[in-house]
Image (tube, rainbow, N blue to C red):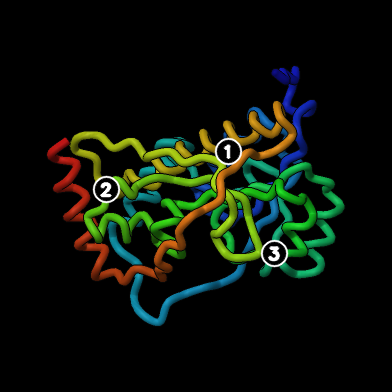
Amino acid sequence: MVTPESPKDRPRVGILTTDTSHHARFVQAIAEKWNVVKVFEEKREISATFETNHEFEKRRDAYELETWFDGKPTGLRDVADVSTFSDLNDPACVAEIRAADCDTLIVFGTGKLTQEIVNLAPDKVVNLHGADPEHYRGLDTHLWAIYHGDFRGLVTTLHKVSAVLERGGVVMKMPIPLHRGMKLFELRKANTDICIELADRGLEMLANYGQYISQPQLYIGRHYSFMPAVLKDRCMTKFEEFTASL
């Protein structure tokens, strides 16, 4: 087993993400143990043509800040060295990722990446996907699993990034732990904790074996888009009815 003495002895990690409280927490936690040399922030604006914001999301954001950062607003720049681009596929971003000389890239919550970025760390670009991509692909996947009453679908997947969106080999999957009386606003925090654990285990695999060991996906899950706010009401009810019976 490889047992490096300090994070700087470990693989050089680049993280591709967006600036949210849960992404800041993810970067903070990974950087505590691993050699995170750079964070590449995507500022691309995407939105639906219908209302998607819901009151539970305000409570979720406040809950996360209180839990992780003692209520203090915290972003990527508070925890890491960050370069920002409107599109991570921009040639200037690709050049900066190349210059960072990363051994691996971890993707968490960005848009589709071109093969040019994947080629910067061949077979060592991995993505954290909120669900099993063999069943749920696209956006708001945990919410769509809840909407369908599929609570066993509340898992998170670490998979390789391929030319076809969300079709790379699966490195590992873990269920999100639910507890009696859990509220929907607590779900993203629980998922982020699992993302940290998956990334940590994946990086240990890379450090020990020089690769991410994966299995190919056998099925192509349904692709989902933004969930309308009105359906989030149903999700909140379904989720809290389910956790009340645990």
Mark toward the start of the polypeptide (2 vs 3): 3
Identify the image quadrant of the N terminus.
top right
Q: CA distance from mark 2 to mark 3?
A: 33 Å
Quarter where residue 221 is shown = bottom left
Q: CA distance from mark 1 to mark 3?
A: 21 Å
Badge 2 density bin: few <14, some 14–19, many ≥20, Cα 10 Å: some
Amino acid at pointer 3: Leu
Q: Nearer the viewer, mark 1 or mark 3?
A: 1
Towards the viewer: 81 or 17: 17
Q: Is residue 231 above or below residue 132?
A: below
Q: Which residue is tagged 1? A: 199
Are the residues flagged by discs 1 and 3 in contact, CB closer than 8 Å? no
Question: Left of 136 or right of it: where is 55?
Answer: left
Amino acid at pointer 1: Ala
Residue drawn at 44 percent across, 46 percent down? 156
Quarter where residue 104 is shown = top right
Q: Which residue is tagged 3? A: 88
Towards the viewer: 11 or 48: 11
Badge 3 density bin: few <14, some 14–19, many ≥20, Cα 10 Å: many
| Residue 85 position in % (x across, y down) | 70, 65
| Residue 43 position in % (x across, y down) | 62, 65
Q: Nearer the viewer, mark 2 or mark 3?
A: 2
Q: Nearer the viewer, mark 1 or mark 2?
A: 2
Are the residues flagged by discs 2 and 3 in contact, CB closer than 8 Å? no
Query: Residue reaching furthest bottom?
Result: 49
Q: Which residue is tagged 2? A: 151
Amino acid at pointer 2: Phe
Dot 2: what SS? helix
